[in-house]
Image: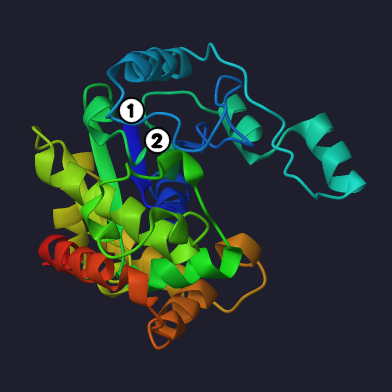
Amino acid sequence: MILVTGCPRSGTTPLGYMFEKFMDYSVLHEPFNYHTGLEQVGSYFQYRDIDQTVNGELKSLLIRIANNDVIMKDGIFPGENIYRRFAKRALGGRTKRSYKNFTGNKRVIKDPFLALSLKSSSEVFDHMFITIRPPVGIINSFRKYKWVFPEVFPYEGFEYFEGYKSSEFLNQPEFYALYIQYLIYISIEKLETNSFTVIDTSKLADKSSIQLAELFGFLKLESYEKLYQNLKNMYESNSKGLFSGIHNHQRGKNALKASYDNVNIPENCMALYMEVCRLYECQAN
């Protein structure tokens, strides 16, 4: 199996879409998402490399997923209307539906909530694709959705709290956007394997077929020129058909560019922001 992971809003969805639509892989969407995934998942980022006991459970669950021996939740989110709830109970959410078709030798798990368990995941997956993008884009997305993940809140002595009270960060989306990226970059640097590829999704649409062959050479695709053409269409289409709705990646690309023009970093996050930018540049180059 292959893992596609990275910080939420870093581009795991378009990369998973590429595997599913253009590379003929069976893709399981976010089995470790608290609301849509496995029955055993009780919080976001439940499995992290800092907890070896829990990660024994993670490896066991991944093996069970490969053997089609788990149960997925219906995928009902708080606040959804009665019609969506009824439909999901009848058909299942995206994760449950994708799990029904999760078969064959070409399988991908697409899940940003495994991004803090890269070491443990590397011991199970044949290869990992880790998505990154400029930090400010992720910050603006977290801010837009008001996302916080208290389960990953760091210890009191975290160095980037210096000069501030940790309580000032607890409900701050910008902080979580930066802190999760920070943890991922540190984990990448510590990986003791070469079976992973870091992909900057902000630059993916501009890759040539030769560059795509370098990124995805592990997959041994028949034609990287075909992948290039498909990727070009994916990011340039204005149609309301194949690339509409959640898969309108041209709209996503335009929004991505716009988000970089709106830089507003809270003062108490500035030191961490500078460090994450440095780490991003190290991986992007």
For label 2, count other residues whose C-alpha is less than 10 Å away and answer few (under 14), some (14-19) or many (20+).
Answer: many
- Position of residue 239 measured from the top left corner of the image (x, y, whole percent): 62, 75
Q: Which of 246 and 39 is in front in this view?
A: 39
> For the residue marked with disc 2, what is the amino acid?
Val
Q: In the image, is residue 110 above or below residue 103?
A: below
**Left or right of 116 in this view: 169:** right
For label 1, count other residues whose C-alpha is less than 10 Å away and answer few (under 14), some (14-19) or many (20+).
Answer: some
**Pointer 1 residue:** 1
**Pointer 2 residue:** 108
Q: In the image, is residue 279 above or below residue 106?
A: below
Quadrant occupied by the C terminus: bottom left
Task: Name the image quarter holding residue 138.
Answer: bottom left
- Position of residue 20 measured from the top left corner of the image (x, y, whole percent): 46, 45
- Position of residue 235 measured from the top left corner of the image (x, y, whole percent): 44, 73
Residue ID at (69%, 36%): 75
**Residue 251 showing in the rendered view:** yes
Q: Estimate the spatial distance between the alpha carbons at disc 1 and disc 2, rounded to whole Å.
A: 6 Å
**Residue 25 showing in the rendered view:** no
Quadrant occupied by the N terminus: top left
Name of the residue lying farthest toward the right? 82
Task: Name the image quarter holding residue 77.
Answer: top right
